[in-house]
Image (cartoon, rainbow, N blue to C red):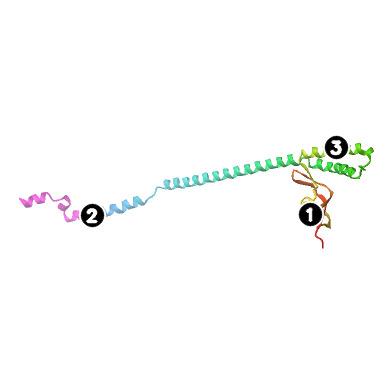
Amino acid sequence: MNVQNAEKFMSSKEQNTPNEQVSDEIQQDQQQPQEAETAAEVDPRDERIAQLEAELAQSQTGVRDAQLRAQAEIENIRRRAEMDVEKAHKFALEKFANELLPVIDSLERALEVANKEDPQLASMIEGIELTLKGLLGAVRKFGVEVVGETGVPFNPEVHQAMSMMESEEFEPNHVMLVMQRGYTLNGRLLRPAMVAVSKAKS
């Protein structure tokens, strides 16, 4: 009875005959490569989807870069336009101011040569002085400034040296005499001042 009960509780695999066990093992060995081949196979549609997604991401990056470049270019154009307008406003009177300089020079020369000791010329001299003062005040309102100080260091950007003279009063390389005053318009040189420059005694 014990032997029979043990045989009843044996697993089905153990109850198979040797031939059946060999057959089952062969079938299992054949299924394993097939399952491996199935797992190794990739759906070509998945590859195409992945490729399209990569291309889309790349194109989106390119679009963003193009937008940033376009925005930067627009900003540069706007700034250049603003600078051009600002310069046009500042220097629109440059030609007109240059035409006024000879008039100012003539009034200054008239004052230089006028005999201020003659009482008969006093009213005329006063009129010339008022005219010159009013003219200079008017052009200053539009950014015209006079370059005509003495005792300042020589500046080649606004001065034109006509001669060099030894001087004890002025330090070397300083403006000691202004022969003709110069003018600037909003910082831009209209005409350099013609000056004599001091030098040390030899």
Label 3: few (<14), some (14–19) or many (≥20) C-alpha neighbours in 10 Å: few
Pick whichever of labels 3 and 1 is earlier in the sequence: 3
Inspect the image, locate mark 2, and give the three-letter code of the amino acid beneath it: Glu
| Foreground residue among 72 and 151 | 151
Q: Residue at x 49, y 45 (%)?
A: 57
Q: Residue furthest left?
A: 1
- Dominant secondary structure of the residues highlighted in magenta in the image: helix
Q: Is residue 199 magenta?
A: no
Query: Residue under circle 1?
Result: 174
Image: magenta residue range? 1-27
Tell us which disc is closer to us: 1 or 2. 1
Query: Residue under circle 2?
Result: 25
Percent from the top left, x then y, of residue 186? 74, 43
Q: Kindly check if marks 3 and 1 are in contact, taking CB atoms under 8 A apart as contact.
A: no
Query: Which structural element holds mark 2?
Result: helix
Inspect the image, locate mark 3, and give the three-letter code of the amino acid beneath it: Leu
Separation (CA) of disc 1 from disc 2: 113 Å
Label 1: few (<14), some (14–19) or many (≥20) C-alpha neighbours in 10 Å: many
Q: Residue at x 91, y 38 (%)?
A: 122
Tell us which disc is closer to us: 2 or 3. 3
Residue 200 sits above or below residue 67 on the image: below
Query: Residue under circle 3?
Result: 130
Q: Kindly check if marks 1 and 2 are in contact, taking CB atoms under 8 A apart as contact.
A: no
